[in-house]
Amino acid sequence: MTSGTITDGPALRDPHTPDSRIGHGADYLHAEHTLRSWFFTTDHKRIALLYLASITAFFVIGAVTAGLVRLALVVPDGQVFTNDTYNKLFTIHGVVMVWFFLIPSIPATFGNFLIPLMIGARDLAFPKLNLASWYVFMTGALFTLASVVLGGVDTGWTFYTPLSTAFSNTWVVPALIGVTIVGFSSILTGLNFVVTIHTMRAPGMTWFRLPIFVWTHYATSLIFLLATPVITVALILLIAERAFHIGVFDPAYGGDPVLFQHLFWFYSHPAVYIMVLPGMGVISEIVPAFAQKKLFGYKFVAYAAIGLASVTFFVWGHHMFVNGQSDFASVAFSVLSFAVAVPSAVKVYNWTATIHKGSLKLDTPMLYAMGYIGLFVLGGLTGLYLATLAINQHVHATYFVVAHFHYIMVGGTVLAFLGGLHFWWPKITGRMYIEAWGRISAFLIFIGFNVTFFPQFILGYLGMPRRYHVYPPEFQFLNILSSAGSTILAVGYLFPMVYLVYSIWFGKRAPANPWDAKGLEWTVPSPPPAHNFLTEPVAPKVPYDYPLQARETGRQHS
Amino acid sequence: MSAGATDTAVGVKLVSHFATVEQQKRAAVLGMWAWLLTELLLFAGLFLTALILRILHPEAVQAAARHLKFWIGATNTVVLIGSSLTMSGAIQLSRLGWQRGMVRFMLATAALGTLFLVLKGYEYYADYHEHMMPFLSDRPYELKDSPPSRLFVNLYYVATSLHGLHLMTGITILLVMTRQASRPGFLSVHQNRIEIFGLYWHFIDLIWILAFPILYVVNR
């Protein structure tokens, strides 16, 4: 199928081509063919695919370095790599995964692709800015990859001072410049989403008719706008100190290293919700579609997104319980951190209530979504352990923390990302993948993930510190188990890369709405036409208008 | 100015992905405000740290703050407020369609911005002579036994040079825009660009109005 316009009569058409595409303009994939039309596109859907390709590449880099870290930890005496190489490996893993995969993953791909479609707009408010933010992203990536090629960085993804400013002899400055630049890309994306959601909604698309996916991206964009500038200034100060000795963090220059931690975590704790909230949006779309049931407590789920985005700004101090902040501050941050559990739990309860008595279809996206809920609950509950002052003293900077944030950030982002990728794949590419392979990948990833990271909770509780590559031999069994799990996980990740790419050429053609899902994006052909809508979109009266209705006690949506 | 009375129609050309011009204008204004919010937060961390430092170490910070050139800072404040005034004039004239007058006011704005940078440069030069740059290892810092004063002075340099960078960006954009805006017919298709840029310019002014008391004046 390379032709632009399908205008032929029924006799000539491909039997798999859905009726909805007959007589309509070319879809966005086939509207133009030149390389130029991809690299200078202002179509949000094509920009989403540019992002998809780039973050997939970063995911591979991050995953390979993670594999090498796990390889090193198979033996307790640290003979696989030198200490220096090991430090560089886990730093590259962290920097690439956090800054170049997890943070942009769902917003930059699905957010870009879906927000205009979901709210009935022809594009984002600033299409050129959107393209510019991809170029900014790639420029930042270039700097950070340059630091890796030149010889690596060994500070960890957090760039803590004074290690990063005074003691590290590695390529810290290019890595810092890269991360600073990437921050601008997030700001521009968030700004575009906020303005689009405020001003570009189709007539009748009121705030409480928006899909939860849009709500969570709205909340995420607010975090992008309010938190990213703070990390930007922190990193600028770090660069100034390392490169020009304008000391703000190093006590030798009159500075204060704890100040860096304050500035860093003021962004980086909210950043956890930059990673998790879009995932929650994806799950809130998948669960009602595969239960064929209206999302339980729509308004509460929407408020919970804004609630999470707000509370997350007041909890950064829980990263600093053992750095000498006042006991009063620690207690306050501990209590506030517990408050995060409330909106998180609201969402989990609402998903389970939506599943309850639904007519369940356990297709690939739903398997990923259920895996997500399981991992998120376990990650969230261990978060309560870490927010508790006394327990935090015991497990601080151990593998318990490593396991916790992998459950939240990988369980909460990667599973949602893959779930969303399978859910919207027919819409994005116009092709169906092979369902059986999808289910196998979902199972492999869930099992591989738990085998990898659950032992790390035990390791951490027993006292194995993070970031060490030499450890007492009694921890070897659990480390081998974890490394074995990472192999299963790697196979699980390889599966979708193969069958999804295969489906682009050999998959069955997708109908406009393969899952009987609700939402404006499913009313347009797959793949969507270049300007999204062939006719003026009509906003649905009720969001998630599925055949089964949850029994609710609260007020109904207007 | 009188020569240019209503020489062009004033308006905005509709870009295809918007439904109405009103929507397009609303999006542009909201976008600029959102950007300015992030800019404010970029400086907020620096200002907050400087204020907390003053509260924790009042003597050391005052000793350092006394070395800042108050009169240059004060003159610069006036210069920048003046530039906001000329920018407002340019915006007002753009609404009326007085293109030539608008261009003159924009050039005056750029000139005042440049004057600010020149004065700031002179102030740095004077600081250099007074050994007030702790990061230059070959010139021993004047208040060398006082870490909080060094931290304060370092914050001062980061904050003011970051502000200077914004001003330089602003002047560059302004000059490019003046060139475009002097072509006939500009105001009939892009009048809102003047308004949107005006927001940014006033904001640079606002940042300085926050920086000046926090760095130069408090507890002086």
Image: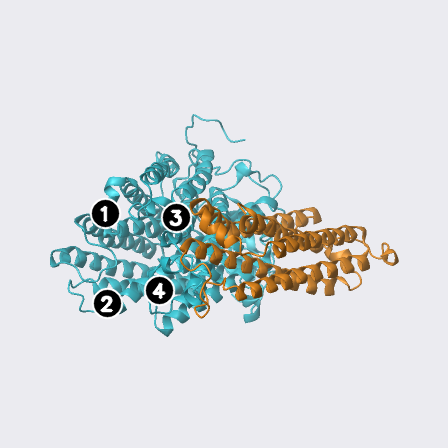
Circle number at residue A442: none
Q: Are marks 2 and 3 on the same chain?
A: yes
Q: How far apart are labels 1 and 2 at the CA level? A: 23 Å
Q: Are marks 1 and 2 on the same chain?
A: yes
Whether A204 is drawn above or below A177: the answer is above
x and y, in percent, of residue A41 in the image: 57, 63
Mark 3 vs 4: CB contact within 8 A: no
Circle number at residue A395: 1
Q: Colour of chain A?
A: cyan
Residue A362 visible? The answer is no
Whether A519 is drawn above or below B43: the answer is above
Residue at disc 3, secondary structure: helix
Which badge, 1 or 3, comes first in the chain's sequence?
3
Q: Is residue B212 left or right of residue A259?
A: right
Residue that badge 2 annotates? A83
x and y, in percent, of residue A4 in the image: 58, 64
Residue at disc 1, secondary structure: helix
Q: Amino acid at mark 1?
A: Val
Q: Amino acid at mark 3?
A: His
x and y, in percent, of residue A187 in the image: 51, 54
Which badge, 4 or 1, comes first in the chain's sequence?
4
Instruction: Name the one closer to the observer, B96 or B172.
Output: B172
Residue that badge 4 annotates? A166
Q: Is residue B140 left or right of residue A371?
A: right
Circle number at residue A269: 3
x and y, in percent, of residue B50 in the image: 48, 50
Which badge, 4 or 2, comes first in the chain's sequence?
2
Which badge, 1 or 2, comes first in the chain's sequence?
2
Q: Amino acid at mark 2?
A: Asn
Q: Chain of mark 4?
A: A
Mark 1 vs 2: CB contact within 8 A: no
Q: Are marks 4 and 1 on the same chain?
A: yes
